[in-house]
Amino acid sequence: MAHAAPGPRTVSRRPGTIHLFSDRTHRVAKLAVPVVLGLVYGYWAAANARYGGPITGWNVLFGFLTALVFAVLYAALLSVAPKLRREAHAVLWGAFSGIAVGFLVNQSHTSVLRSAALGVATAVVVFAFLFYRYYTHEDAKGHRIE
């Protein structure tokens, strides 16, 4: 019995990638992902800061301000970082993730040295991983190949 051959997939504007979702879905995700991640991060930071105590108005305000700062910085990195060279791109994401982890650990009432060590360790691991990824997905002139 014969089967139909798979149809061609719609190709996105970027060469080498497959366009699975509509442009509208990508526009919504570009706004929704930083907001959702910011809310999760803000809740996590507020929960660490209250250390099992009661939820207060200041704690809620702290959570929302943390969420706002995280979402704005994340959205800015999503728009700025891909335009940079691979080294700077990896450094920015490494620094962002290291600072984010260090801040969360610091809110859980541990020592500053422990939060700094975990933040630096996270930044180094993220930098190494992303630098390797960007290095293996670019040609000799720095143009992305996917």
Image (cartoon, helix red, strand yellow):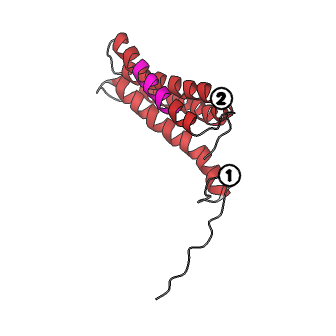
Can you identify the residue that label 1 sits on?
A: 15
In percent of width and height, residue 36 lies at: 50, 42
Mark number displayed over residue 119: none
Q: Nearer the viewer, residue 61 or 124?
A: 124
| Left or right: 15, with 62 as reference point | right
- Where is residue 6? Give x, y as percent: 56, 73
Q: Could you tell me the amino acid type at mark 2?
A: Arg
Q: Secondary structure at mark 2?
A: loop
Q: Amino acid at mark 1?
A: Pro
Asked whether 83 falls inside the magenta stretch, the response is: no
Residue of label 2: 85
Q: Which residues are magenta?
A: 120-130
For image coordinates 62% across by 66% down, the residue present is 9
Q: Position of residue 31 (x, y in %)?
A: 61, 44
For label 1, the crowd category at 10 Å Cα-Cα, with few meaning under 14, some 14 to 19 and many 20 or more, is few
Let me know if residue 58 appears in the view: no
Q: Residue furthest front?
A: 140
Judge left or right: residue 113 versus residue 124: left
From the viewer's side, name the closer residue of 75 and 65.
Answer: 75
Who is closer to the viewer here, 66 or 118?
118
Q: Position of residue 91 (x, y in %)?
A: 56, 24
- Horizontally, residue 129 falls left or right of residue 76, namely left
Q: Nearer the viewer, residue 47 or 119?
A: 119
CA gap between label 2 and label 1 equals 19 Å
Q: Main secondary structure of the magenta part?
A: helix
Asked whether disc 2 touches disc 1, contact meaning CB atoms under 8 Å apart, the reply is no
Residue 93: quadrant of the picture: top right
